Amino acid sequence: MSPMARTAPVPAATDPAIIRNFCIIAHIDHGKSTLADRMLQFTGVVQARDMKAQYLDRMDIERERGITIKSQAVRMPWEVDNTAYALNMIDTPGHVDFTYEVSRSLAACEGAVLLVDAAQGIEAQTLANLYLAMENDLTIIPVLNKIDLPAAQPEKYAEELANLIGGDPEEVLKVSGKTGVGVEALLDRIVRDIPNPVGDANAPARAMIFDSVYDTYRGVVTYVRVVDGQLTPRERIQMMSTKASHELLEIGVSSPEPVPSKGLGVGEVGYLITGVKDVRQSKVGDTVTNLARPATESLGGYQDPKPMVFSGLYPLDGTDYPNLREALDKLKLNDAALVYEPETSAALGFGFRVGFLGLLHLEIVRERLEREFNLDLISTAPNVVYEVTLEDKSVATVTNPSEFPSGKINEVREPMVAATILAPNEFVGAIMELCQGRRGQMRGMDYLSEDRVEMRYWIPLAEIVFDFFDQLKSKTRGYASLDWKADGEQVADLVKVDILLQGEQVDAFSAITHRDKAYAYGVMMTSKLRELIPRQQFEVPIQAAIGSRIIARENIRAIRKDVLAKCYGGDITRKRKLLEKQKEGKKRMKMVGRVEVPQEAFIAALTTDESKDKAKK
Amino acid sequence: MPGALPLGDPAPADGLLPPQVLDGVGSRHFGLYVHIPFCAVRCGYCDFNTYTAKELGGGASQDAYAETAVAEVDFAARALEASGLPPRRISTVFFGGGTPTLLPAEDLARILGAAVGHWGLEPGAEVTTEANPDSVTPESLQLLAEAGFTRVSFGMQSAVPHVLKVLDRTHSPERVPQAVQWAREAGLDVSLDLIYGTPGESMDDWRTSLETALSYGPDHISAYALIVEDGTKLAAQMRRGEVPGIDDDDHAAKYELADELITAAGLAWYEVSNWSRTPEHACRHNLAYWRGDDWWGIGPGSHSHVGGVRWWNVKHPVAYANRLAAGESPAAGRETLDAGTREMERIMLEARLGSGLEVDALDAVGRHAVAGLIADGLVEPAAAFKGRLVLTLKGRLLADAVVRRLLPE
Ligand SMILES: Nc1nc2c(ncn2[C@@H]2O[C@H](COP(=O)(O)OP(=O)(O)O)[C@@H](O)[C@H]2O)c(=O)[nH]1
Ligand SMILES: C[S@@+](CC[C@H](N)C(=O)[O-])C[C@H]1O[C@@H](n2cnc3c(N)ncnc32)[C@H](O)[C@@H]1O
Ligand code: SF4
Ligand SMILES: [Mg+2]
């Protein structure tokens, strides 16, 4: 067993031969944060008494949801055979919405710890990240975690892991992040198995940005992995994608608190601060070089994050609109993937159409807006981006159903995804049924082990952004896992369904659906609204329509009685208070034509049943 | 459990009123309400301030109550005078409850006598008592008439035994015509209270109740929609699913039937829930509430209004009696209405009256709403053209919505 290093290698003067850069690939809840905690403790960078659980998960929401959104890099010393090594652990986000960030983190490493819960086995997302790691040619160290659990089946899953990456089940390490068992052996293995970084110390500097975080006090903190050359404090650096240059105000390593250094050399991982205020000025995937002696070729791999899912966000209280704008502007500083533009809805007033990487991203942004900025929001049903070609061959990109062209349409293209589902084989039938119902095409199916299958589907993104995952979970008693990535587009028979109240179209309820599902949507929405909208002084027809063709209809009968017909004697005050309350209630109504629609009805109509359950928790 | 009192400002112990109550006092009638907070049993739907115990202790017990009430009458006379209000004769008196006739007629007479002693009655004054059909006798009614009562309002509620049972009413239906007969013999005008929409009441049941009530030839009918008040036994039964819930459409249909049958019998509506044989038989005391006149409410939980100041007494009879015994005002709180609130109340109250609301009294928002109300069939067009808003039958059923449309945002 190796001791804690007596002297840690000094940044900027570290021989690449004693550097190990690695990340941990794990499914949510398989114990990545806990394992990282143990490593911090065993290497002595965090004293036991300062240790709080999931030390690296900085954001509150992250800590509460137990998911890692922002990756971080920590430098830890570790001694093997009397040599002190510098281990850089790069914590990657675990969720599909952040695949691009994951791939950049992986590109900064030479090796990856594949961490799998010994009671659960490998999950679809882990598989996807494992492919990414293999694509980057990383050395994989398979590890089974939580072996302290009585339900752990280390032998079974060691076999499964060995089958996947090729190797001997005996090679699979068994650890417990909770008790610390096997963690030191793992640190030793990292040193032994993972190759050290190589690069040209004399070449012009090239460093890859794998994360970029906004900090209120220091501005943007950029995390980089140096490939060639050197970065030193005070020099001017250049971003190769934009050619923008900045002064390096500070450079250093995380240990895990930031510690300034004399610079960073080949193979080193650390942070830099230039005083910029917006993460867009320091983009993940970009290459940093010296301004005075710039590299000619970037490290490549940079791509702009592409929003996949759009939703309208509206303040419940219209006067909060400027606050919502300010809040989005602030969030944007820390979230390069967040895009938005103002939009107006006849029904909901002023708001923003916001683009997200996926549903989790949407939920996190919404939650942060509500929590950190104290806003009450309505969000419209999420939708994807459609390319609509008109008969005159002009093409419109539609991110909001109410903008769907009403003229003659030639074709509509929708984004597709390649989805991978892992589940026990008893659920194959249920999963096939679900995917077929969602217009998915099966692309293949493999047995991972005797009783676990991997199913691959090509499926419209629009079909999975709405409650697909919840359906999948409930149809497989929670056993299935899902991963997806964007994979082209297809032409489909898509139509816009409008909802009309007393003949007035309610833009917030318009939806783009496949023609075969338009009727179901229309019936669902009209009957939902019939329940939600209180009776008015006149009859209110609720219709669902494709163009001018009505496909579903409900009726809200006129209210016949709205009078307090009781003897209140001289207690006029009570009667007046009642009236004042009714008037208050009226203020919370939005007018659609002459129809008074309570805010709650909008929220309820736009909320799926699952998200309601979540709100209750 | 009686409903809660409003929250207001503290009321002064001496009961003195601010000088503003003097404004326009000459044009306002003065009335008296006397609350008798006792009942033999509490009806399952009732949240009025009433108690079934005979012995609440001290001045709150049934035996001592008349004396306690007289103490407030005396207090009122002193406070009004000390506030600089000129002496005014009483135009209306209303004994309500609870069940006033649970007290001996002599007690009611004594309270009335004290008030008349202080202020005197206007000629032709209206003096009403509420009564339960089974708490009166020919003698007691005779006594009341001799003491100066002119009118009795019986809580008939329904003529159908299974409906009376759900309402927890103890009287047998045959008792009502008898009581009406005795009241007539004593020379009293008669009003009947009915409740519609009781769980389990069919349309035919309601028709029976209406026809039965009308067959007794009342001078006045009040028909109220059953309100399920929080905290009542009925509300609990409904929550537990023991009785069916309330259906507004059923209420509407029953109101329409009431209006049809009562009107056919020769009575006319003058307020959403009230019909009278002639305009003179309308309950002037209730009209005074709706028209913003002055009245003093005697008794625990009673509400008073004088010139834009409203106040209400402490609720429990014991607390009430203690206050008076200490020579203090029994008021629990009060509010002084600003001009806007008085306007709002005026619209809220006058819109419900058969005489209607003056269009000129509305602000721009209200006047702007009138055309829409005509278009929606909620107010009578002919009256509106003459400058008054009078609700149509449909409008009466939607009176609260009409009021909301007339009020400033
Ligand atoms: N029994 C046991 N529980 C563990 C172990 N490692 C993590 N956990 C628990 O598993 C849950 C998820 O752990 P976490 O580190 O947040 O997982 P992450 O989502 O991969 O970062 C937490 O409740 C941990 O306490 C372990 O080795 N043994
Ligand atoms: C002040 S109450 C009491 C009068 C008398 N104690 C009685 O019950 O006959 C006057 C009338 O209000 C009506 N009432 C009482 N509670 C009601 C309720 N919850 N809903 C509708 N009307 C009610 C009844 O018609 C009752 O006759
Ligand atoms: S008799 Fe009248 S006041 Fe008494 S409990 Fe019944 S409804 Fe209420
Ligand atoms: Mg974590």
Image (cartoon, rainbow, N blue to C red):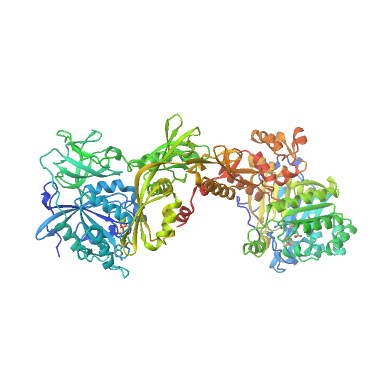
Is residue A288 rendered to the left or right of residue B355?
left
Residue sticking out furthest to the bottom: A150
Is residue A24 rendered to the left or right of residue A596?
left
Residue A504 x/y as whole percent: 58, 38
Residue A285 x/y as whole percent: 25, 42
Is residue B355 rendered to the left or right of residue A141?
right
Is A32 in front, or is A172?
A: A172
Position of the N terminus of chain A, as image quadrant, is: bottom left
Residue B178 x/y as whole percent: 87, 62
Residue A374 x/y as whole percent: 43, 46
Q: Residue at x 28, y 52 (%)?
A: A129
Residue B149 visible? The answer is no
Rendered view: B252 above or below B71:
above
Is A411 in front, or is B38?
A: A411
Is residue A505 rendered to the left or right of residue B217?
left
Q: Residue at x 61, y 40 (%)?
A: A502
Is A479 in front, or is A56?
A: A479
Residue A125 visible? The answer is yes
Position of the C terminus of chain A, as image quadrant, is: bottom left
